[in-house]
Amino acid sequence: MKKALIIVALFLVPFLSVKADIFTDGTVDLKPAKLELAWTATCGANELTIEISGIGSLPNDSVIRDTCGPDLASLIEANFTDFNCRRDGLECTSIYETGSISEKRIYNGTVFFSKSHVVSVLIKEETIARTCPPDAFPSYVANYFATDGEVYCFNPDDANLNDSCSVSNGNEYLTIEVSAPSGCFPQPDGSMCKYDAVDIGGGNEYYALDLEGDCYSDNDLPTLNGIPQDMPTGEECVSFGGGVLGCPEDPSNVCTGGGVYAGGSVQNCQSGCGMVNDQFLCIDNDLDGDGLPDYNDPDIDGDGIPNDDDLDNDNDGKDDPIHGDKPGTNIPGSGVGSGGEIKIDLTPVVNELKKLNESFSDGGQAKDLDHNQDLTNLNDAYQTKLTSLMGKTSSELGYTDSLNLGNSSGLSSRLPTNDCTVYNFHPAGKTISLDMCFVADKVKPLLFWLFGLLTAWHIFYTINKTLREGI
């Protein structure tokens, strides 16, 4: 069974009672701590010291050195200031070896510097310790320090079951400065409650009660210190600094029924709303500095545009990812007052498309596709141009195709060197010539105009069909 060592002269007390609380009024059962022999010792090496302690009789110096030596070696290594220790390929070590610490510099496996530091026992003392748990109560592993100097033990599960760290706590939120991600804060009745830092945007945080936290068993959690901010008086909000407001609120406006808050029946409250110093508040940012918290501000960014119509509620110059995702906005399906799906009104868009479609018809009757003779005139011009082009050669048209391969043989001899070459075939000893040059010269511009016309016609037909049938 692991023992919790308590040496009154050397350790800070986590639970000090100055008035009746859950530990002195019998809510949490206490048992006297067990008295045992204990010892403390201070070791040193290379001008660094550490303190160790243990239960039982004071050991000899050799055992003390072996106990504190490895920790001292780690402390020496952590304090290396030599710049060379940060160079690639260089290793700096500090290792405890039977009464002394060996410090070395190693480069590519070769030791080029070595120094030894003797571990000395500077102070050693035997004392009486009060430890938990008592032999008869192995589950009473947590310590409670009374005002009369006595030390008691209690069961952490008993404290967690009976403390005030619950939904009815008068300090669901803390208004002290955030100094750690999580920590424990003492309550007026002696309870130690865990709080977690909560980000509310704009670089601001506050502490919110963690209902599943355990400050009696988790010894790694720090104790949170600080003086709570001034509380609001009347209905006015107070500034908690950094653009954060604390505002009195009627729980019925921000909570739903089911639990107990300040004598009322409320639960499932809006984020940031709860009890602070026995007063129900809502904590939120005040983006525009108008004295209204963002959750209750009809114009969060103060640009004169109501939240429901403002695509940039946070005033960062960019449209928000989802219209209405900021506090104070309300759109269908946003989760504020509605659980339905988001509906988008496309009526203006449809109306504009209908107007466009009407421009292609007269009195509801479809117009002839070439009612203004534009396509006929285009075709006549094309036929005239085509007849002229058919009578010209490629050189007359001003272009010559060529392929030049320098410093090459074999392939170049096989390729035509002029604009066009007659290809000869020799099947069964006969010679057959294939002359496509004249045809190519004539067909090339024809194909260019033909495919261009077909492409334009297809685009025009597709748009017209879409507007007629798609609305």
Image (cartoon, rainbow, N blue to C red):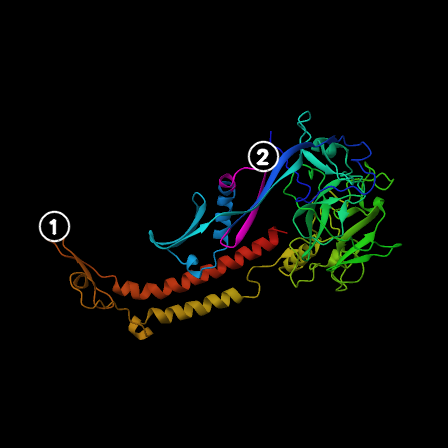
Which label is found at residue 428?
Answer: 1
At horizontal 57% and vertical 54% (from top left) the residue drawn is: 465
61 in magenta:
yes
Q: Amino acid at mark 1?
A: Ala
* Number of other residues with Cα within 10 Å of mark 1, as a class: few under 14, some 14 to 19, many 20 or more: few
Image quadrant in which you'd find residue 220: top right
Residue 393 visible to the viewer:
no
What's the distance in space between the residues labelled 2 and 1, CA to CA? Answer: 117 Å
Q: Which residues are magenta?
A: 45-64
Quadrant for the N terminus in the image? top right
The relative height of residue 393 versus residue 193 in the rendered view (above or below) is below
Q: Are the residues at dot 2 and dot 1 in contact (C-beta closer than 8 Å)?
A: no
> To which quarter of the image does residue 138 belong?
top right
Mark 2, residue position = 57
Q: Along the line of sight, which residue is nearer the eye, 44 or 324?
A: 44
Is 87 magenta? The answer is no
The residue at the far left in this view is: 429
Q: Alpha-carbon neighbours of circle 2 within 10 Å: few (<14), some, or many (≥20)?
A: few
Q: Position of residue 287 (x, y in %)?
A: 73, 60
Which comes before the other along the chain, label 2 or label 1? 2
Q: Nearer the viewer, residue 231 or 444?
A: 231
Tell me which residue sits at (14%, 51%) in the image: 427
Residue 393 lies, with reference to residue 298, above or below; the image says: below
